[in-house]
Amino acid sequence: MKIGFPRALYYFDYFPFWAGFFHRLEIEVVTSPPTHRLIMEQGLKKASDETCLPLKLLAGHIQALKDVDGIFLPRMVSVEADTYSCPKFLGIPESLLPAVPPGIPVLSVVLNWRKGQRQVLKDLQVFGLQLGKSKAEIRKAFTEGQEWQRRYQASNGAGWDFEESMREIERATKGLTNPVSNVKTWKERVLAKNPLTVQKCSDPPRTVIDQDTDRLKISLVGHSYLTLESYVNLNILRKLREKADVELTEHVNQADVSAHLAGLRKKLFWSHAKQIYGSGNKFVTDPQVDGVIYLTCFGCGTDSMVQEMLALIARQHHKPYMVVTLDEHSGEAGLVTRLEAFLDMVERRKAHEGDISTYGECLDRDSNTL
Ligand code: SF4
C-alpha cells in the first residue's frame, strides 16, 4: 500500500511521527514534490479565496500526489495538553476535499492530545482497522512514531538542517522493500536499520548562532511551514544566511518557550502561537540577537495577534523588528530590498551602540520600527 502525504502545513512539524508510524506498519509513504509554480497555481484554483496561504499550498500539494492508494489528511485537533491547533487545521480534510483528485480515497484520523494519550491510541486503532492492522500493530507503530518525532525534535534543537533531516526520513520510508544487501552506502545501511541514527553520525550540526564572530545575529520567527518553505518565502532563509547567523523558532526548546510565556496575563490557545510567541520573546530579550524578523502570511488569524504582541515587546527593548507578510503575489525584488535595508540598519545600529540619530540619541523610542 502507498499512502500520499502532502509536503505542506503539518509536514513541516509532524511528518517524522507519521513516517515512523507508517514505516512500522510497512506502508510506503509517498510525499508530493517540493513546491513549484504549478503546485501553487493549482492550489489557488481549488482552495477558498479567503483562506490562508499555507492552506492554499496544501490544496496544490494534494493535487500533486499521483499513483497512490489514498491521501492521508489527519485532523490534528490538538498536539499537546491545554492547547488547540489553529481552527483551519480542524477543518481538514473537509475544507480540502475539492482538491482531492477523483478516484483517490482520503484517509483521515482525529488526533486530539487534549483527551490524553490513551484516547489518541484508541483513535489510531480505529483508523488502523481501515488499513487492516491489528490493535497490537498500531500500538507498536504509535511508539515508533513518537520515537521518530522525539529524535527529530532533538535534532532540531541542535540546529540540524531541516531539508537534510526530511530527505533522510523520506528515503527511509521508501526503503521498505529494499533488502539491506541492496543498499549501497554506509549512510543508507544505517538508515535501513534506524532512519534517524544517521543524524547523529554524519556531519556536525550546523551552528545556529556563533557567539565568537562579528556576523549579525538575526532571528526569523514564524510558522515552520513559512520559514522552511523556500519557494513561498522566496528563499529568505538562504538570503539571510549569506549575511548573518540565523536562528529559527524551531531551534528554541520547550523549556525556554515555557519560560518566555510566563509573563502573559492569559494563556495562548494555539500550539503554534505559543511556540512563536515564546521563542520570539526569547529572541527579542536576548542581547546576543541583533534583530528579529517576523515572517507571516496574508490571512493568518493567529499571527495577526501574536505579531502585535511581539512588536510591543520589541519596542520596549529597542530591538530592531520587521514583519514580512507573504502572499501568492509576493515579489522577490521587494523582499530583497527590504531585507537589505533592515540588515544595513541593524549593522549601523550595532556599530553605533544603538544610537541611530546623528546627535547620538535615539529620537524614535516609541516607534514600531526600531
Ligand atoms: S495558523 Fe495561520 S497560517 Fe497556519 S493554518 Fe492557521 S490561519 Fe493558516
Image (spheres, rainbow, N blue to C red):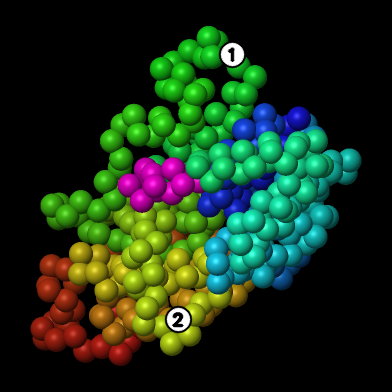
Instruction: Residue 134: name its quadrant.
Output: top right
Relative to the observer, which residue lies in front, 297 or 65? 65
Give the quarter of the figure containing the C terminus. bottom left
Q: Say which amino acid is labelled 1.
A: Pro
The percent coordinates of residue 8 (x first, y second) are: 61, 50
Q: Quadrant of residue 262?
A: bottom left
Q: Would you place residue 278 above or below residue 25 in this image? A: below
**Is 105 situated left or right of 140 in this image?**
right
The nearer-to-camera label among 2 and 1 is: 1
Residue 158 versus residue 332 in the image, above or below:
above
Structural crowding at the residue carrying mark 2, measured as other residues with C-alpha within 10 Å and reported as few (<14), some (14–19) or many (≥20): few
Start and end of the magenta stretch? 149-160
Residue 108 higher or lower than 22, as above or below: below
Asked whether residue 343 is in view, the answer is: yes
Magenta-drawn stretch contains 151: yes
Q: Which residue is mark 2?
A: 308
Residue 215 locus on image (x, y percent): 19, 54
Residue 179, label in figure: 1
Q: Secondary structure at mark 1?
A: loop
Under mark 2, the amino acid is Glu
Residue drawn 36% across the image and 59% down it: 252
Asked whether, in this view, residue 216 is left or right of residue 21, the answer is: left
Q: Residue at x 48, y 76 (%)?
A: 306
Secondary structure predominantly adopted by residues drawn in magenta? helix
Residue plotted at (80% across, 60% down): 94
Q: Position of residue 368 (x, y in %)?
A: 36, 83
Check disc 2 and report its element: helix, strand or loop: helix
For the residues labelled 2 and 1, say whether their Cβ atoms are less than 8 Å apart. Answer: no
